[in-house]
Image (spheres, helix red, strand yellow):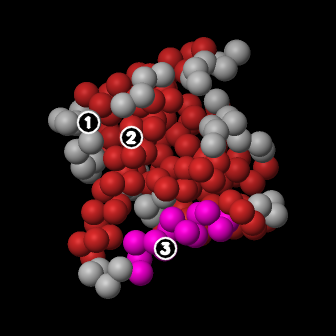
């Protein structure tokens, strides 16, 4: 799928540039995110680009990487999911949710829109690793794995390249 939607060429280019910054600022690509205000700014702007391209679920997922004022960004992303049709894969991205707040917000969207299969899929991924008795180490690894998967998916969507 090409990131450029008719009439959104500059938004698509901006999304690509923000993703290029994120890729270039990490060695390797899949390393843990840096805790910086600059990276937060790039994630916020990438969220805006994804929202303007009608990829509302991806926009919400990107908010998980924002360190400061994350809840405000979630609310902005949720406004679109509540009111408009998303052009991305929606609940199929549930395997990339690693923040409980986002899981609850997405669950609310699915329940309001009578999307029970989507809600079930979200919960199956959200609580799959939580039941493991080994605890925090397992959860930290799972969060890292889901974050890496999100980065690969964003790179595939924005660069039209699959890793």
Return the disc, 3 or 1, that comes first in the chain's sequence.
1
Q: Does residue 117 show up magenta in the picture?
A: no
SS at mark 1 in the image? loop
Where 15 falls versus 93 (above or below)? above
Can you tell which mark lies on residue 52? none
Q: Main secondary structure of the magenta part?
A: helix
Please indicate whether residue 14 sits to the left or right of residue 4 in the image: left
Q: Is residue 6 above or below residue 114?
A: above
Q: Which residue is mark 2?
A: 151
Q: Which mark is residue 127?
A: 3
Q: Residues within 10 Å of mark 2 (few under 14, many from 20)?
A: some
**Residue beneath label 1, please?**
29
Say which residue appears at 39% left-offset and 38% top-offset: 152
Residue 115 lies in quadrant: bottom right
Residue at position x 43%, y 45% in the image: 150
- Residue 10 vs residue 70: left or right? right
Residue 147, position as x, y percentages in the image:
37, 51
Quadrant of the frame with the N terminus? top right
Q: Is residue 60 visible?
A: no
Name the mark nearer the viewer: 3 or 1. Answer: 3
Residue range corresponding to the magenta coloring: 119-131
**Which comes before the other along the chain, label 2 or label 1?**
1
Element marked by disc 2: helix
Q: Are marks 3 and 1 in contact (CB under 8 Å)?
A: no
């Amino acid at each position: 799928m090409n990131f450029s939607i008719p009439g959104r060429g500059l938004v698509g280019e901006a999304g690509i540039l923000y993703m290029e910054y994120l890729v270039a600022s990490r060695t390797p690509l899949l390393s843990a995110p840096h805790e910086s205000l600059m990276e937060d700014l790039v994630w916020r702007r990438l969220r805006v680009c994804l929202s303007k391209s009608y990829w509302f679920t991806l926009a919400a997922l990107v908010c998980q990487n924002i360190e400061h004022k994350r809840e405000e960004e979630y609310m902005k992303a949720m406004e679109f999911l509540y009111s408009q049709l998303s052009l991305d894969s929606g609940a199929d991205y549930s395997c990339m949710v690693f923040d409980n707040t986002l899981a609850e917000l997405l669950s609310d969207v699915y329940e309001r829109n009578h999307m029970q299969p989507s809600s079930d899929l979200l919960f199956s991924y959200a609580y799959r690793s939580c039941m493991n008795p080994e605890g925090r180490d397992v959860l930290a690894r799972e969060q890292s794995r889901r974050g890496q998967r999100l980065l690969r998916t964003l790179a595939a969507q924005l660069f039209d390249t699959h890793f």
